[in-house]
Amino acid sequence: MNKVAIGWSSGKDSALTFYRLMRSNEFIPAALFTTYNSTSDRLPIQGSRIEAVRKQAQAIGLPLIEIDLPESCPNEEYERRVTSALSSHKEEFSSLAFGDLFLDGIKEYRESFLNPAGFELIFPLMGIPTEELANEIVNLGLKARICSVDSTQLDPKFIGREFDKKLLNDLPENVDLCGENGEFHTFVYDGPIFKTRPMIEFKEPKNLGRFTFLEMATL
């Protein structure tokens, strides 16, 4: 079976990607990889603290490849750093998996610089309706909380909410159920992908202008 590294955003989509590969007869999850900024200690867009993501990886039982990016990172520098970091682990895996759903051009963009580096790319969730995926995540018992809200698209009152049936019913009609237009992001803290529950404590939200983040502490 092919060994695969999973692009890890700390949220529900990457967790579902991991779960599907874990249960497949074709791939063996060998590592997680993530990008973050060492100045803020946060993942870009998602806003999760890198120390909380490390706790997730420990609870899953896989190594976490951490790729440090500058705050304002042009595409060329992003591609260089990601390719360099992953290529140094090519003996450990030959495939990369991403939890992208339908964002225009993202599949082609990732393939444009990672295929030439010798990696096969896998997109297990690509093109599946988000309503179907949202319900699958809930029904599998993947436990997640909303950890980031874009206030231009969703009321910050949703920060910290559990990703459950009630949330899916409460989200406004113009908000994608998986937040795939950037309305919100999630942090997974329990479920069938973990060997133990990550030692995370959720704290009070922090407003940083347009975005509100759910703060976390590691235990």
Image (cartoon, rainbow, N blue to C red):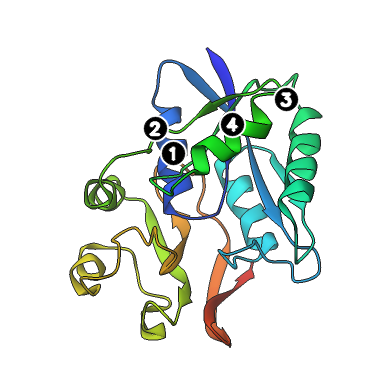
Which is closer to the viewer, label 1 or label 3?
Answer: 3
Query: Which residue corresponds to the image point at 33% horizontal and 64% vertical from the top-left?
Result: 163
Q: Position of residue 115 (x, y in %)?
A: 64, 25
Query: Which residue corresponds to the image point at 44% horizontal and 29% vertical from the top-left?
Result: 21
- Give the residue pinned by disc 4: 111
Q: CA distance from mark 1 to mark 3?
A: 22 Å
At label 3, the amino acid type is Ala
- Give the residue pinned by disc 2: 20
Is there CB contact under 8 Å for labels 2 and 1? yes
Q: Is residue 25 above or below residue 84?
A: above
Q: Residue furthest top?
A: 1
Bin the neighbour count of mark 4 within 10 Å (Cα to Cα): few under 14, some 14-19, many 20 and up: some
Which mark sits nearer the N-terminus, 4 or 1?
1
Is there CB contact under 8 Å for labels 4 and 1? no
- Give the residue pinned by disc 1: 17
Q: CA distance from mark 4 to mark 1?
A: 18 Å
Q: Nearer the viewer, residue 116 or 91?
A: 116
Which mark sits nearer the N-terminus, 2 or 4?
2
Q: Secondary structure at mark 2?
A: helix
Q: Position of residue 23 (x, y in %)?
A: 39, 26
- Give the residue pinned by disc 3: 117
Bin the neighbour count of mark 3 within 10 Å (Cα to Cα): few under 14, some 14-19, many 20 and up: some
Which mark sits nearer the N-terminus, 3 or 2?
2
Q: CA distance from mark 3 to mark 4?
A: 9 Å
Q: Is residue 200 visible?
A: yes
